[in-house]
Image (cartoon, rainbow, N blue to C red):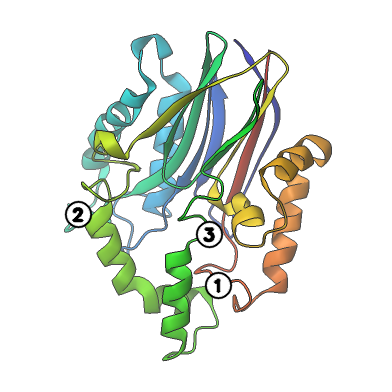
Amino acid sequence: MPIDIIDIASQGSGAINEDRTGSAGTLAWVIDGATDLVETPLVGEHSDAAWLAEQTQRRLEVFQLKELDDLAELPIELARHLADAFYEQTRRQPAAQWEHPSAAAMITRTRQGALEWISLGDCALIVETPDGLKSIGVGSPNAGDPGVSSTLQRIRKQHAMNSDTQRLTRMLPELRKGRGENLNQPGGYGVISITPPPADLISTGTLPVARGSHALLATDGLMRLVEIFARHDAASLLEAAKATGLNGLINELRSLEDADNDCHGYPRVKRSDDATALLIRIR
């Protein structure tokens, strides 16, 4: 089942956009590079997150799907490719697991009347199916970073944090500890990185789709409209994407972020986040 790209949008929150999105044949994806926790990038020109997202994008663009029967094998293949590129280009060896570049991703492909998906991290997928609207990664227990929210509130009681830099600096020890203990580790979380995730941390599934149905793939930056600001649910987000376009949704998001400039009303580490989405139609 071929796909048509109906709309595509990706806007960085600053000078460097660490998200990527694209398609190749029946494959479609969004990638969200995880913010660096190292002081100086190990391999990237601007950030290791942007480097990893770009390397993953390039690999997906040339990847031959006939090489892969099970989509769950893709993170292992990507990790092998990324590790080769990383250790060939790195300025120094990583000293700890938290220094490894990583990215969340939602990757889909159409095959035999179905949409197959693989999810690593906190990207989202919303799909029209014959059985109604289905969503992956929307409204999950970790959506909207409740852990980050509680940590921010606790640290705020001791320190003033009125900028992204201050928030990141105060939280850096805990962020490094959490990433080091959990990134592609048993009992932790699975992401795209230079090490493969354990099989049980790779989320996959298959949804029936009909010709003419739509699917929306989005990074957590755009999903702030649902998970943090509660301006949309899965259904209204998809309808808005179809009706007014993805750039309209990003503009709505930026207005909400700007209105809560100090992040007190809606706790978050970064005032704004890179926001990316891809709207496809099955044909």
Q: Amino acid at mark 1?
A: Pro
In three-dimensional space, the C-alpha distance between marks 3 and 2, rounded to whole angstroms, equals 29 Å
Secondary structure under badge 1? loop
Residue 51's x, y, as percent? Answer: 40, 45
Judging depth in this view, the residue of 219 and 144 nearest the camera is: 144
In three-dimensional space, the C-alpha distance between marks 3 and 1, rounded to whole angstroms, equals 9 Å
Q: Amino acid at mark 2?
A: Pro
Q: What residue is drawn where x is 35% and y is 47%? A: 102
Q: Which residue sits furthest right?
A: 243
Q: Residues within 10 Å of mark 2 (few under 14, many from 20)?
A: some
Q: What residue is drawn where x is 23% and y is 33%? A: 84
In three-dimensional space, the C-alpha distance between marks 2 and 1, rounded to whole angstroms, equals 31 Å
Q: What residue is drawn where x is 17% and y is 52%? A: 93
Q: Which mark is residue 144?
A: 3
Q: Which mark is residue 267?
A: 1
Q: Which residue is mark 2?
A: 94
Q: What residue is drawn where x is 22% and y is 58%? A: 181
Numbered circles on residues, count? 3
Residue 238's x, y, as percent? Answer: 71, 38
Residue 247 left/right relative to 1: right
Secondary structure under badge 3? loop
Secondary structure under badge 2? loop
Q: Amino acid at mark 3?
A: Gly
Disc with the residue nearer the chain's start (3 vs 1): 3
Q: Nearer the viewer, mark 3 or mark 2?
A: 3
Residue 39 left/right relative to 109: left
